[in-house]
Amino acid sequence: MDFTAVACNLLTKKTDCLVITLNGRTENNTVQKSNAWNSVDSATGGLLSRLQKKGDIKETLGSSVLINEPKGLAATRLLILGSGTKILDEQLFLTLTKNLAGKLTKLPIKNSCISLEGIEVDGRDNAWQAQQLARQLGEANYLFNPFKAKDKKFSSLKQITLAQSSRKGLEQLKQQLNLGKAVANGVNVSRELGDLPGNICTPSYLAIQAKKLAKKHPRLSCKVLDEKQMKALGMHSLLSVTAGTEQPAKLIVLEYTGTKKGDKPVVLVGKGVTFDSGGISLKPGAAMDEMKYDMCGAASVLGTFTALIETNLALNVVGIIPAVENMPGGKATKPGDIVKSMSGQTIEILNTDAEGRLILCDALTYAGRFKPKSVVDIATLTGACVMALGSHATGLLSNNDALAATLETAGQTSGDRVWRLPLWKEYDKQLKSNFADMANIGGRAAGTITAACFLGRFTKDYHWAHLDIAGTAWNSGANKGATGRPVPLLTQFLVDQITS
């Protein structure tokens, strides 16, 4: 899908579908009409006013009316979208554009011209609106059904034009539309990897996809460490997770050089458990199929790098993906086993289903060799985070307030929000082991926090943040599927590294 911005006359604009909005009520309970509404209403002989008076057109958020072959317009169709209120907050605007994207991608059209004139988002400008519009339209174009013989219904919509009355700010709008498109492409890459079944999306498959991505851009390189190389590095914690499976573990390392080689990189570390049975600490059978999503941290890193190479950001970024499969077997790690991590610290494994932290700790130690500006790990780590925050916010924990604040701001800007939890020493005490330097679990209480405390023991040499995406990486139920989060958050975080 391609995007552009133009200054044009809506009445003479030839398009398969012209979109305008009916702005919602103000504090005085009056509906203010935009110039776009008034001009289209006049050109159609007052049709819009008559339909509104009859109740066919409502200002309710997301309500819409489609008019075919509207007289007085060059457009083939006219779609009128209610915006709810005159001034929206960020989440309401995202809801509005997501609703619009869903409608447009279902129509038999190849192009659409959209006017958002009259819509205001509190604290955000037109450029922000443009980025979010492109992102929502791009995400709505995602379709995952490679294994279905039928229902392969792809959207025909290929071209979006954002219209405004003047040429002022057009170049900035075009830039933000392209950024939104890049984010959407990254989100969709992440979603597709997440939705693939575990028998296809194995650690080796992730490594192949990373190599393919690196071939697309001269600034991006990829290397993959095998189990022999990881063993030589002392990554016995990571390798303990993969002991029970026939699928070999991989450590995927992506390096994007967007500026001078000596500049410190931002490092993204994504948990890549391509299927998590729980190992010897076997999970219940119900909903175990969803454990194919336990590699969504890895998928988000690959999705973010997809957006990164499309935007050519002037920034050095490293992606590290520890990719494993966690299965029971005759050689599988047992509860009570003790392993030595790459850092030299020993770990008593009390629960083999707390495996994500066991692969991340070695990957985080490995991240230190890049002398990073900051490190962010992304992991579907704890069910406790789902209980605490549901599916609305990603859990954030960090050893640096400035880094945490930057991620919180990026979350607010992108609409892909986070909520910070404490990382206090009192919680760290729950990881005490009688037989090793630490246990891999800290009991039922504050499970999200103690998991982060465990990771914090391997990140003392740099600024680090942990994103627990267990509640945000995928949806269950009738709309089961990967969400692609937190690609929007991570991409905005990287953009902010340049502008700050």
Image (cartoon, rainbow, N blue to C red):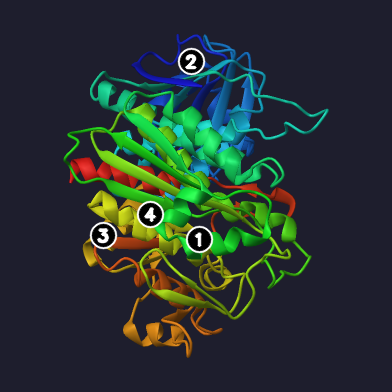
Question: Mark 3 and mark 2: span between their CA atoms?
Answer: 53 Å
Q: Earlier in the sequence, mark 3 or mark 4?
A: 4
Left or right: residue 481 compared with residue 376:
right
Callout 2 crowding tier (Cα within 10 Å): few <14, some 14–19, many ≥20: some
- Indicate the secondary structure of the residue bearing disc 2: helix
Q: Marks 1 and 2, how far apart in space?
A: 67 Å
Please report whichever mark, 3 or 2, sits nearer to the chain's N-terminal start: 2
Label 4 packing within 10 angstroms: few (<14), some (14-19), many (20+): few
**Is there any visible trace of residue 58 in the rendered image?**
no
Q: Are the two marked residues, 3 and 2, in contact with CB atoms closer than 8 angstroms?
A: no
Work out whether residue 402 or residue 88 is closer to the camera in this orientation and state it.
402
- Front: mark 3 or 2: 3
Q: Which residue is mark 3?
A: 403
Q: Of marks 3 and 1, which one's residue comes earlier in the chain? A: 1
> For the residues marked 3 and 1, what is the alpha-carbon distance in whole angstroms?
27 Å
Numbered disc in front, either 1 or 2: 1
Q: Amino acid at mark 3?
A: Leu
Does residue 113 lie above or below 486 as drawn?
Answer: above
Residue 231: image location, x then y, percent: 47, 56
Q: Which is more foreground, mark 3 or mark 1? A: 1
Q: Residue furthest right?
A: 149
User: Residue, x 17% and y 42% (percent of image)?
Assistant: 263
Q: Secondary structure at mark 4?
A: loop
Q: Residue at label 1?
A: 238
Q: CA distance from mark 1 to mark 4?
A: 58 Å
